[in-house]
Image: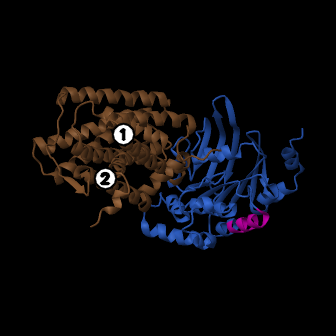
Chain colours: A brown, B blue
Amino acid sequence: MNFAFFEVFDVYLLEAVVNGILLGGVLALMALGLNLIFGVIDVVWICYAELIMIGMYGLYYAYAVYALPMWIAAPMCIALVAVLGLLLHYIVIRPLLDAAPINQLLATGGVLFFLQSFATVAFGIDFRNLGIRLPVLAIGEMHFSYARLLAFLAAVAGMVTIYLFMTRTYIGTAIRAIAQDRQIMVLMGVDSRRLYLVTSALGGALAGLAACLLVLQYDVHPFVGLSFGPITFMIVVLGGLGNFIGGFVASFVFAEIISLGGLYSDLEWGYVLAFAFFILMMFARPQGLLTRRS
Amino acid sequence: MTAPLLAVRNLQVRYGDLIGVADVSFEVAPGSIVALLGSNGAGKTTTLNAIAGIVPASAGQIEFAGRAIAGEPAYAIVRKGLALSPEGWRLFVQQSVEKNLLLGATPVGDKARIQHQLQRVYAVFPRLAERRKQQAGTMSGGERQMLAVGRALMSEPKLLLLDEPSLGLAPAIIETMYETFLRLHKEGLTVLLAEQSVDLALEVASYAYVLQVGRSVLCGPARDLLNNPEVQRIYLGVG
């Protein structure tokens, strides 16, 4: 193969763009879960990233400590977080469904601190990882980690599965319909409480999948949620809360800002740029990227 | 006289301090078309919504097929065979015509029966069959009204509640809609119709009730009300 084509561009720039896309896939997966919950149940799971953190520990224990094979450990981890999503809904959200939004935020915010403290007590504050070092793929002068490629592909597969579920099945159709018009869904004979449970399990499963993909690349510790929770919220807000496509687009916009920003300085600066971009956008388009101005 | 399919007694609906419906009573005999008349704000929509269970009744009784249904959740009421085609259609605009209809069939459950009912609705509204794959939000007003009625029919109702089915439609389309209602009625459907247009409603209804500021104030066979000057007086709000 002839790589002369790439020489036209700065090879590092191209590498950063591709890495941005890979990161965007995982961010989009997390944004989808949060959007699903907000769009359907109309609550924000502030503790979303902490569910992912628990999932990361789940995979760590199943795979690295109890030495289960990955094909058992990963589905177990996804199921575990799906159950956590169900419990979160059943115990915390359902009693507050008719409460003021601020109460719901405070309650799920409480769960965030609960999960962090729980993880600190149960797992300690050490950084842990799976102990897998996946090789690096070299294309010309560019280097991509297999872990990122794998995470990207799995994230895309997860999103495609959700898309098919939402468009091809009755329950998916009903979930989209309830996001559109909550009041009228009951006229269809639908008990919305059951749909909320299904949605919470789905949102949890997505967090579980994200957990599997993140723990491939990053160490897990009780406060790991802080490193991707805020960015997920910014993406979802920027995409327009509950707007799936907006969240998808915003994920890649943010991922590219982080990746390209990191190219010209440190990775931390990439995050600083992303947060600055978010603040600017809140002035320019407070309703989200894709909303039409009325 | 046979027992009424639907009986509403001294219905009251409050929204906080506001009174949406003060005191409404009426009955719907099985196999009939009954009209609820009244000007804008008389409480027709609130009455229908309270019967369907999407707004809570604060006082009074609602009986369907001999059983009290007031206070039951709306999804349970639909399953008993009482479907509402709501004001403003309230379609799932981002989804296809067929998906809208299938959502309406939720209470039926059985796949074969749902398919059968789908074919029936398509036979009643051939236009919907032509547009089955089209997004509901891209259709004309008349087509949306057909879809709203079709969606309500998908639950195999014994009683169909129609809220202002002529609102915002062209006269030719209204006429077709009403012919369809008469056809459904002949096939055995009981209909409760809320209409602002008196002439239209009294043409198809056998019996009618007139609401005025949240109260049922007048009732009688449709033929009698058509010539009753009192109806005109209530509508014009004179005296």
Which residue is denoted by mark 2 in the rendering?
A152
Q: What residue type is labelled 2?
A: Phe
Percent position of residue A44, x then y: 43, 36
Q: In which quarter of the image is the N terminus of chain A?
A: bottom left
Q: Quadrant of residue B171?
A: bottom right
Q: Which residue is at 79% across, 62% downward?
A: B203
Percent position of residue A198, x then y: 37, 48
The numbered disc on residue B72 is: none
Task: Give the mark nearer the N terminus: 1 vs 2.
Answer: 2
Magenta portion: prevailing SS class: helix
The numbered disc on residue A264 is: 1
Front-most of B24 and A53? Answer: A53
Task: Reply yes or no: does residue B179 show up in magenta.
Answer: yes
Host chain of mark 1: A
Q: In which quarter of the image is residue B1?
A: bottom right
Q: In this view, does A62 lie to the left or right of A259?
A: left
Q: Which residue is at 31% across, 38% downward?
A: A87
For the question of whether residue A175 can be seen, the reply is: yes
